[in-house]
Image (tube, rainbow, N blue to C red):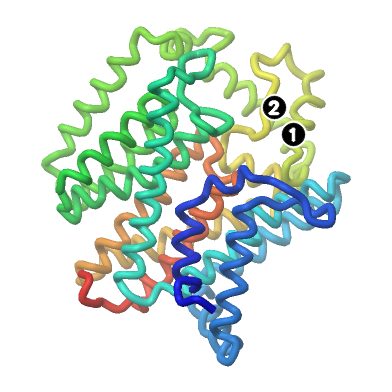
Amino acid sequence: MPKFISTKNLIYLTLFFTPAYMVRFSVFKIPLNLLDILILLTITIWIYENNLQLLEKIKLSLKKSSPILPSIFLILLGLFVASFLNENWLKELGIIKSWFILPILFGFITSNETKKLSDFKKILNTLFYSSLFISLVGIFYLAFNQLTYDGRLEAFYLSPNFLAMIIAPGFLIGCWKFIANKERGSYILISLTLIAIILFFTHSYATWLSVFASIFVILFFTQKKYLLALIIILLLLFSLEYNSDKFKNLSHYTESSSLKSRLVIWQVSQKIISDNWLWGIGPGNFQEEYLNYQKYFPPYPEWAVPQPHNLFLAFWLQTGLLGFIGFLYLILIWLTKTIKTLISSKDFYQKNILLILITIIFSTLVHGLIDTPYWKNDLALIFWSIIFTSLSVTQKTISEDNSK
């Protein structure tokens, strides 16, 4: 087998080409996409490379992953039970495969292969350059004025929010490089500027707020003196939006505003949960249930709603109470462990790595209050990669090497 076909290289390739999930096809009526294939190839090569020590590696990795295994079990159990009790099995099992099982296995392998500081830096750089690549493509859409009807940039994604959500982690990594690592070369500044331009033209306020809140975390732990500058930039940014139609609709709370629409969606979601609080409605069924519940409410301001625009509601609705408890437990145990290690550790490199990990997950949780930055192939892959890789850092199984 050629040397360049290795597990580590496939990890970097898969994380870089997260948009590959858009290339969809079926094999023996099983729905697949190109991102699935990259993940499956990574798993296959990892098994091949470790065939003689596979069981031992799995045992060691399971031991390292033990803090989060109960939560993963609850999430998967909730998903399968919810799917079994609903009728749309093929669609539901496809979602479980692509948004949970494969990303979890990929994260498991990524954690196993992250043994040195240089490995982790390569993972972060891959996410950063993937966001930069997507932003460069977005620049062409922007240059040719390929925008949505309301003047927002979505590039090749289905919505501006999807574009904003996928490049946000890379932007945060770039900010971390610039602020905490003091990598202030011209390429970092240019790259951050390009990604920031694309983020701005998505006009995704939820992403903006989550990004600014997360940069606040980086500054709080590294450069508190710049917090005022961050607040000024935030106020300046929204002052530029003051006369936009979207901001006016939001601030005046019109029938067509995104705020009005979200409030209705959350009310409907709560009604659906009250009727399905134990087992949920199964993954991928929210749109259908949302329309079925129209009879209980005035005419909806928005009809096409595949997700409930809240990360926590999405987990309860689609994985039932078991999956929802599993997700809450996962976040609680992960945050407790990583924040405790960040505060108590005297190892600069360990603290520095944990800072960006916490920042990315914190951004997801803040964003998750008003949107669903998980229930998508690419976002799920990044989420589990960060969750699993952090286990190597908190347990100090990443060795410092000459790359530091």
The residue singled out by tag 2 in the image is 268
At 70% from the left and 20% from the top, the residue drawn is: 303
- Is 225 situated left or right of 295 in this image? left
* Above or below, comparing residue 301 to residue 359 in the picture: above
Give neighbour class at mark 2: few <14, some 14-19, many 20+ (Cα, 10 Å): many
Badge 1 marks a residue whose secondary structure is helix
Q: Residue furthest bottom?
A: 52
Secondary element at tag 2: helix
Q: Residues within 10 Å of mark 1 (few under 14, many from 20)?
A: some
Separation of disc 1 and disc 2 at Cα?
Answer: 6 Å
Residue assigned mark 1? 272
Number of marks in picture:
2
Image spot of residue 152 (x, y percent)? 46, 20
For the residue marked with disc 1, what is the amino acid? Ile
* Residue at left offset 74%, top offset 34%: 272
Give the quarter of the figure containing the N terminus: bottom right
Q: Residue at x 63, y 33 (%)?
A: 308
User: Residue most toward the right?
Assistant: 87
Asked whether the beta carbons under mark 1 and mark 2 sit within 8 Å of each other, the answer is: yes
